[in-house]
Image (tube, rainbow, N blue to C red):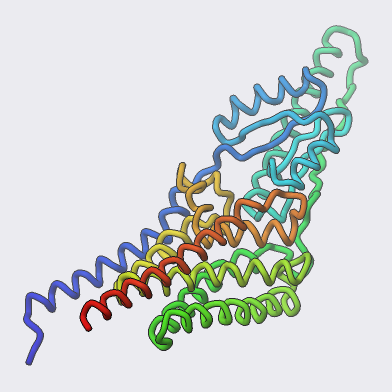
Amino acid sequence: MHTPWRRTVALALGAGLAVVVILLAFLWPTVTSSVKDLPIAVTGSPAAVSAVTAQLDKSAEGALALTTASSRADAVKLIENRTVDGAIVLGEHPEVLTASANGAAVSQLLGQLAAKLQAQAQQQADAAVQQAVAAGKAPAGTVAPKITVAVTDVVPLASTDARGLGLTASSFPLVLGGMIGGVLISILVAGSWRRLTAVVVYAAAGGLAVTAIMQGWFGILQGGFWANWLAVSLSMLATSAFIVGMNALLGRAGLAVGAVVTVLIGNPLSSAAQPLQFVAAPWGAIGQWFVPGASVTLLRDLSYFPAADALFPWLVLLGWAAVGVIAMLAGHFRNQEVSEAAA
């Protein structure tokens, strides 16, 4: 028996619409991203800080969220605990502090900011010398000293991932791996307790293999191996448990729900390739409440920013894992009650 023409056309149009949705989900955060509210610290004399702050607010309105640091050491500490993404040090030896471990987008922006500050400072110095010459306070031909704004990377990337591409590229495979594990366990394993055991074993074993490759082989991850293993395993557990739990509650439709939440919502908003401030508000912050965003942030903190407070991403991953386990158990007891009623 042939498929009715109406259904055939509807299925084809639906498949085309699905492609459009997927395309928008992955392209929208990138196409609509813009430089805004990047947290930057400024340190120096009150007069210099006030002047530079006013200048940057005027020339780069909305691009930077400036805060004051008491000293260069304080600015470095703020960068290391990820309170800010960079800093401007004013004084006799002006300097821009950056952290390439935050991503290429931040490093490029701060490099451009350093060049801009240097050009402006040189222009002001040249004007001051010209005024002095005109007033007879300096001999003719006097040239202003060359001003250089140094750029210092206080949290550099590892030489094994010098451009940070590995950490960025690893986000989607982790999401996809967790999703595939959840789908396979949902389809091939029968029994709620067996599914729960399979999810835990899968996450632990898969996390060990992934961490060994990313840290031991490619050198993408840094820091403690077992802390990274726990983070990767918890990420895979959160995704796979959620998908298995949705399947237990909703049947095969639950697999689609799990995939949509994880791949089409969580992954595009994860801010793996750019600061969350660059994503249209409030989606950048919302993305950190999903597994992909939390796992990327956690792995970056563990590898390069051990002083940062990583409690939030840990809790997010634990929360999604707990939701998945609760959904699995709820589906189990609901199905048990239905079976007993039928009997």
Above or below — where is 191 with respect to 18? below
Residue 37: x and y, percent? 57, 37
Above or below — where is 2 with respect to 41? below
Q: In which quarter of the image is the C terminus?
A: bottom left
User: What residue do we see at 45% from left, 77% from top?
Assistant: 182
Q: Quadrant of the N terminus?
A: bottom left
User: What residue do we see at 48% from left, 84% from top?
Assistant: 194
Residue 8: x and y, percent? 13, 78
Give left or right: position of 48 versus 54.
right
State the image quarter where residue 44 is shown. top right
Nearer to us in this view, 30 or 125: 30
Nearer to us in this view, 129 or 249: 249
Give left or right: position of 308 versus 132.
left
User: What residue do we see at 46% from left, 63% from top?
Assistant: 323
Residue 340: x and y, percent? 27, 79
Nearer to us in this view, 221 or 288: 288
User: What residue do we see at 41% from left, 88% from top?
Assistant: 188
Give left or right: position of 337 versus 259.
left
Residue 257: x and y, percent? 35, 67
State the image quarter where residue 76 is shown. top right
Nearer to us in this view, 288 or 90: 288
Above or below — where is 71 with respect to 331? above
Q: Which residue lies furthest to the right in this view?
A: 139
